[in-house]
Amino acid sequence: MKRVYNFSAGPSTLPESVLKQAQEDMISYKDAGMNVMEMSHRSPVYGEIIDTAKQDLIDLMEIPDNYEVLFLQGGASTQFAMIPMNLGVKGKAQYINTGAWTKKAIAEAKKLGMEVDVVATSEDTTFSYIPKITSEQVDVDSDYFYIASNNTIYGTSFVNLPDTKGVTLIADMSSDILSKVVNVSDYGIIFAGAQKNMGPAGVTVVIIRKDLIGNAGVTVPTMLNYETHSKAGSMFNTPPTYSIYVAGLVFKWLKEIGGLPAIQKINEDKAALLYDYMDTTEFYKTPVAKEDRSLMNITFLCSTSELDAAFIKGAAKKDMVNLKGHRSLGGMRASIYNAMPIEGVQALIDYMKEFEAANK
Ligand SMILES: Cc1ncc(COP(=O)(O)O)c(C=O)c1O
């Protein structure tokens, strides 16, 4: 059966061994006589699946005891509202605007009546860099300070975290969770939709410091209150059972290959291959500031949109798909998440060289 190199920004490629395991479990999960998606979420067998997935995530990220791990629905986008609804006690928050996803988060907080201070933005250059802030810009009276750690569309990433002077840091890690070692204690909330580095769409992981739970106002809907899900062990209503099961397989795969230090090294090596090559040629340009380059989403352009289109078409003929850049930036974007093998990156570079030689 043919597999392509899938450079999609999300939903994205999954490890083949995970897909094979899911295939093996398709007709009957172990000796349950049914698929995971056919099971009651209240059954002991499913209880073991969700508990194991949660524990494996805790082990991988070394999540301390004073944090809760929640498996929620509504995508990362629902967190844009849940965060102000649950944390906006004083009604003030600060955001760094690094792209379309932070803009959406800012808009949602404003809609909920928050006083939003956009501390810094890189919109002036179509988000080609991560704006640096000084600690003087931090309002210590804010409820929280919000960033997107990796910007899927533009290909930028925070290498160093801003100093928030003790203000609770919130990170949208949708496109770089589990790609490298992070110190969970640096954050009040880490959240991510699963569909890039964790598994299928449908589940959103929220890692939240326990003291931030239980502060929502009385008008906050039950389903949008972290306390609801924390008290119910992510089982207040039917959780996205199958997505959690596949994410659990991805966590096991990551553990087997050596956890986050090992995948970080692999991701650094993969990204370096591509960036090092691009730095040797004028044919492809990456719009991103060198010090803010993402390890996950690598954006680049040829000199004309016609060449970009020809590049993407030629790549697809060689079974390298989903390389078209986001419409707001154009050009190309290679999303090289955890599950993209180094061979895929090498194949892309070989093709880039070939395309350059034919079109220069
Ligand atoms: C950084 C980031 N945040 C949020 C989202 C939105 O995620 P969802 O579609 O799960 O709501 C995305 C989706 O691509 C993303 O890349």
Image (cartoon, rainbow, N blue to C red):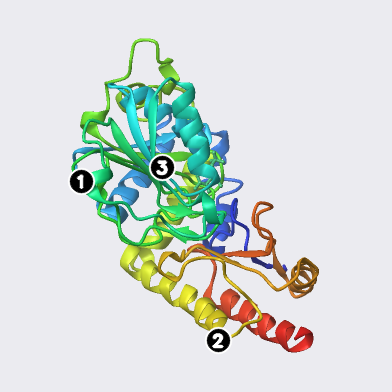
Residues under labels 1 and 3: Cα distance?
21 Å
Question: Mark 1 or mark 3, which has the lower sequence index?
Answer: 3
Marks 1/3 in contact by CB < 8 Å: the verdict is: no
Residue 49 numbered tag: 3
Residue at the image position 46 percent from the left and 77 percent from the top = 272
**Residue 183 at x, y = what percent?**
25, 54
Is the C terminus in the top left, top right, bottom left or bottom right quadrant? bottom right
**Residue 192 at x, y = what percent?**
44, 44
Is the N terminus in the top left, top right, bottom left or bottom right quadrant? bottom right
Circle 2 packing at 10 Å, graded few (<14), some (14-19), many (20+), is few
* Nearest to the observer: residue 38 or residue 97: 97
Residue 64 numbered tag: 1
Question: Mark 1 or mark 2, which has the lower sequence index?
Answer: 1
Numbered disc 3: secondary structure: helix
**Tag 2 residue:** 280
Circle 1 packing at 10 Å, graded few (<14), some (14-19), many (20+), is few
Disc 1 marks which amino acid? Answer: Pro
Disc 2 marks which amino acid? Answer: Thr
Give the image quarter of residue 282: bottom right
Q: Nearer the viewer, mark 3 or mark 2?
A: 2
Residue at the image position 39 percent from the left and 24 percent from the top = 114
Ligand 1: does it lie within 8 Å of the C-beta at label 2? no
Whether 81 is drawn above or below 253: the answer is: above
Residue 220 in sight in this render: yes
Outermost residue, bottom side = 357
Specify whether 319 is left or right of 83.
right
Give the image quarter of residue 303: bottom right
Residues under labels 3 and 2: Cα distance?
47 Å
